[in-house]
Amino acid sequence: MKALYNTYKSHYSSNLKLAIPVVISQLGHTLVQVADGVIVGHFAGTIPLAAVSLGNSIFTIILVIGIGISYGLTPLIAQQSGRNNFNECGRLLYNSLYINIISGIILFLTVYMGILAFIDHLDQSPLVVEQTKSFLALLGISIIPLMIFNTFKQFAEGLGFTKQAMMISIWGNVLNIILGIIFVKGLFGIEPMGVRGVGYSTLIDRTVMAFAMGFYIFFSKHFKPYLQARALKRFSKKRTFNILKIGAPVALQYTFEVSAFSGAAILMGIIGIAEQAAHQVAISLAATTYMMASGISAAAAIRSGNHFGKKDFVQLRLSAISSYHIVLVFMSVTALLFITFNQYLPWLYTSDERVIAIASRLLVIAGVFQLFDGAQVVGLGILRGIGDVNIPTWITLLAYWIIGLPVAYFLGIQLHAGATGIWYGLTLGLLVSSVLLFLRFQRSSKKLHIY
């Protein structure tokens, strides 16, 4: 163990230094949904909590598509930074900003013109659907400022500047919680808004974050070398293609995984409202640790991109393996917390005893799949850093939609195993994904080392 630690010691330090701010920043995306669930669960009741569950489960697909597209910028920035090509970094930023604004508008229209009409045909409770629609409409608008924020965030993180996005995310979540309580409960003369209240608070939060991150990028001395006038050239088809060549498959990777969990929420709704609310409780807690692991993954992608740009393949492999070690240790700790406190954590969201009983059982399963979830997301990040995104996309499709979700449906609905049966299927999908992605990393990194 001592020899192993000494081999990776320097990489543990450098990766954690980069990862911790990214982890906190990434956590901001999930904490918005966690805050929505807690506020609604305590101040509005079980049906509104089920509406937040359904709305967030559907919108999360839109969210990760947007995040995935924006991720196409980071490895390219990391690689060009490794080559000290400052002007190219600036050009990539502006092209990414155009792409992400257009993508945000398209995703908003998808929600407003597609999902809001489709949601009536998901065999859900009419009371839940009615409240979900107003919530989803506001979340749909919020994707546009979120995409702008992500553009600047991924640019800064690709250059190794991670703390500012972290601070903006922290204060953004504080603003979201304060406004959510005011709007949902109806304070200071404002009429109680229920589920719509957390929709408005999320929209305001993301708009403020976009302006704050943009101001930081354009006025900080750190980025002046990258934002020279010659970097402001017209829209480049080549750069657009290079960004989307990474961003589009990454968007699909996240979509395949998250949509499987969203599909699970719909299956829960078929079983019952209490099961759907319990799924929201358990999945929001699991999503919190997942986004922390996603931050480690983002840092791994940046480090892999830097080493890949420098053609230092030995250090690339050592850095990547150290990221696997970090995420496995972290997820082991969170797994123990979920299993140990499974009876108590659901009380953060609701006092409905039936919902708590179901959620506590799901948290035990979540404790088990933490390890697989962390390993697979770090594997995706490492491979993204070296530009290997196509095969991993097929792996995620196989793991979640060909294996995970069908098994979840078979166990939960056909064999009447209920909520736990659905989560067993999801766990199997995560196991398959983590193993196949690690094997892909082994093959790709050893090939780079050889040649």
Image (tube, grey):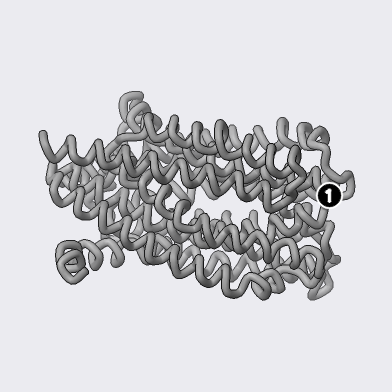
Q: Which residue is mark 1?
A: 128
Identify the residue shown where x is 52% and y is 59%. Answer: 368
Residue 34: x and y, percent? 63, 63
Tag 1, which secondary structure? helix
Residue 79: x and y, percent? 23, 43
Residue 196 in view (yes/no): no
Residue 372: x and y, percent? 45, 52
Query: Relative to 253, is 159 above or below?
Result: below
Query: Relative to 82, is 176 above or below?
Result: below
Query: Are there few (<14), some (14-19), or many (20+) residues within 10 Å of tag 1?
Result: many
Identify the residue shown where x is 13% and y is 48%. Answer: 314
- Please name whichever residue, 317 or 239, is drawn nearer the observer in this view of the structure: 317
Question: Residue placed farthest to the front in the image?
Answer: 415
Q: Is residue 329 left or right of residue 290?
A: left
Identify the residue shown where x is 37% and y is 30%. Answer: 391
Question: Residue placed farthest to the right in the image?
Answer: 127
Q: Splitting the image into 4 quarters, where does residue 14 fall? A: bottom left
Location of the C terminus by quadrant is top left
Residue 127 in view (yes/no): yes
Location of the N terminus by quadrant is bottom left
Q: Splitting the image into 4 quarters, where does residue 380 fall? A: top left
**What amino acid is found at the position of numbered circle 1 in the picture?**
Val
Q: Is residue 178 left or right of residue 152?
A: right
Q: Is residue 160 left or right of residue 406?
A: left
Identify the residue shown where x is 40% and y is 31%. Answer: 244
Question: Residue placed farthest to the top in the image?
Answer: 237
Query: Relative to 349, is 259 above or below?
Result: above
- Please name whichever residue, 210 or 367, is drawn nearer the observer in this view of the structure: 367
- Please name whichever residue, 438 or 50, is drawn nearer the observer in this view of the structure: 438
Residue 116: x and y, percent? 76, 37
Query: Relative to 284, is 445 above or below?
Result: above
